[in-house]
Amino acid sequence: MSSLFDYDKDREAASAAKVRALEALLIKKGVLGSESVDAVLRHFETVAGPFNGARIVARAWVDPEYKARLLEDTPKAIAELQFPGMTGAEGEHMKAVANSPTVHNLIICTLCSCYPWPVLGLPPYWYKDPVFRSRGVREPRAVLREFGVTIPADKDVKVWDSSAQIRWFVIPEQPARSEHLNEEQLAALVTPEAMMGVALVPSPHTA
Amino acid sequence: MFTRFEEYAATQMLGQPDSPPRNDGKLLFSEEWQRTVFGLALALSKEGHFEWEDFRHNLISAIAAWEKNACAGEVTWDYYEQYAKALIELLEQRGMLKPGELERQMRLDEASK
């Protein structure tokens, strides 16, 4: 077995050396600025990468007044939390909708694949799937059942179609038996899927 | 509609054969060089050195070639290895890298250690 691991280490080292040389060479030749790669990566790591949404939801759960502000003026309420790197345009068009005992919300995008990157990070692959998109409109309850979320018949299902103008996200319901958790522990329960409405947030002990 | 090249580029790949490894809404890099090479291709395309779709074409071909030979070669799957290969090929095709140039730089780096 050890020879297998040695091989892998060599392979990683070879790839690392090759990529390092490639970057150095392109900068030396003036093809690439020395900051260009970092600037691109920073976008993924600070704006469109981290799952900031969990913190927004946890704050809304512990602070009803924050939740009201979030529903009223989403970009302004998100700005209160001061996520690093998120300034101006990225957060501009977002709008939050809240799940409740009587309403379940589902987010889709029928046009292309508009998505609230700054709060949810990279979209899951199926978000772009035309079948998911069209069935989400036509038969949201069936689609949700396939995701393992059964919505009782007397609960409304609302479907929100994201666009370049408005990028929706869901504030899921706080799970039962989570009242004793602090904000950070609550945030750890929230998933991007729950904020798209295709999952519920499980109670802490059943998670 | 995308206002940022980075988001356009990453979204084009999702659900396709060249979709990058992700975990919980984040790109998944297990080594620093993977992060660097991902950023290199994006930065070069963003600055207009090639169309993103042209890079993806090479990447999809590299992945398909690996899949075809996977069992014969017994080399385990490494997305970013194919990614680096596709990028280097494209730069050579476009004349941004001359034959042997990368190897020379690697020897220089090795010597200056």
Image (cartoon, coloured by chain):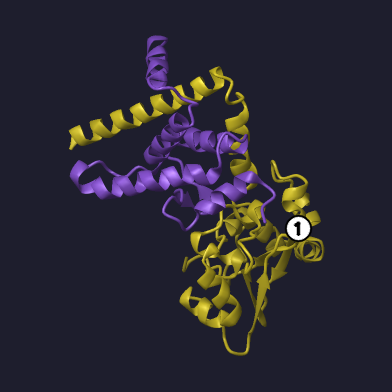
Chain colours: A yellow, B purple
Near-viewer residue (A179 or B64): B64
Q: Chain of mark 1?
A: A
Q: In the rendered structure, which amino acid carries the disc numbered 1?
A: His
> Could you say which quadrant of the image residue B105 lies in?
top left
Residue at 57% x, 71% y is: A133
Near-viewer residue (A22 or B89): B89
Near-viewer residue (B29 or A202): B29
Q: In the displayed structure, would residue B70 be above or below residue B14? A: above
Residue A133 visible from this viewpoint: yes
Q: Position of residue A182 (x, y in %)?
A: 63, 57
Mark 1 burial class by Cα count in 10 Å: few <14, some 14-19, many 20+:
some
Q: Position of residue B2 (x, y in %)?
A: 66, 52
In the visual, does A181 lie left or right of A149? right
Q: Residue furthest top?
A: B112
SS at mark 1 in the image: loop
User: Badge 1 is on which residue?
Assistant: A93
Q: Position of residue A62 (x, y in %)?
A: 70, 62
Q: In the displayed structure, would residue B72 be above or below residue A20? A: below
Q: In the displayed structure, would residue B39 be above or below residue A201? A: above
Residue at 17% x, 38% y is: A1
In the visual, does A53 lie left or right of A66? left
Residue at 74% x, 46% y is: A82
Residue A183 visible from this viewpoint: no
Residue at 47% x, 46% y is: B56
> Could you say which quadrant of the image residue A196 lies in?
bottom right
Q: Position of residue A38 (x, y in %)?
A: 59, 32
